[in-house]
Image (spheres, rainbow, N blue to C red):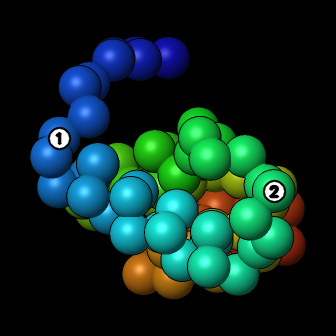
């Protein structure tokens, strides 16, 4: 496997912040004020036009609907 680490672009960080803001508006104010890493993963995938391999499709479809998901349900 070829794996590389890429910095979070400003576009990706902005997408993650918008998704986290939407999340905070849906949840109780007592929820954590620090975004889960999933928000940064989703923002990065959205900005890069990449797909996400996940078992948590509901989360990503809720906050990053335009990101392609690879899930157990989508595989033959």
Question: In the depicted view, which residue is nearer to us: 49 or 61?
Answer: 61
The total of numbered circles placed on residues is 2
Where residue 18 appears, x then y in whole percent?
Answer: 38, 69
Per the image, label 2 sits on a secondary structure element best described as: loop
Q: Is residue 32 left or right of residue 46?
A: right
Per the image, label 1 sits on a secondary structure element best described as: loop
Where 9 falls versus 58 (above or below)?
A: above
**Which residue shows up at 63% across the image and 71% down it?**
23
Where residue 19 appears, x then y in whole percent?
Answer: 48, 69
Where residue 74 appears, x then y in whole percent?
Answer: 74, 73
Q: Is residue 75 visible?
A: no
Query: Do the residues under discs 2 and 1 have CB atoms within 8 angstroms?
Result: no
**Which residue shows up at 74% across the image and 65% down it?**
29
Where residue 48 appears, x then y in whole percent?
Answer: 24, 54
According to the image, label 2 marks what residue?
A: 30
According to the image, label 1 marks what residue?
A: 9
């Amino acid at each position: 496997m070829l794996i590389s680490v890429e910095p979070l672009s400003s576009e990706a960080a902005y997408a993650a912040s918008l998704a986290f803001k939407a999340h905070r508006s849906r949840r109780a104010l007592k929820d954590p004020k620090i975004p889960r890493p999933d928000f940064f993963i989703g923002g990065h995938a959205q900005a890069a036009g990449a797909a996400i391999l996940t078992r948590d499709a509901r989360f990503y479809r809720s906050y990053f609907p335009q990101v392609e998901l690879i899930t157990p349900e989508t595989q033959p």
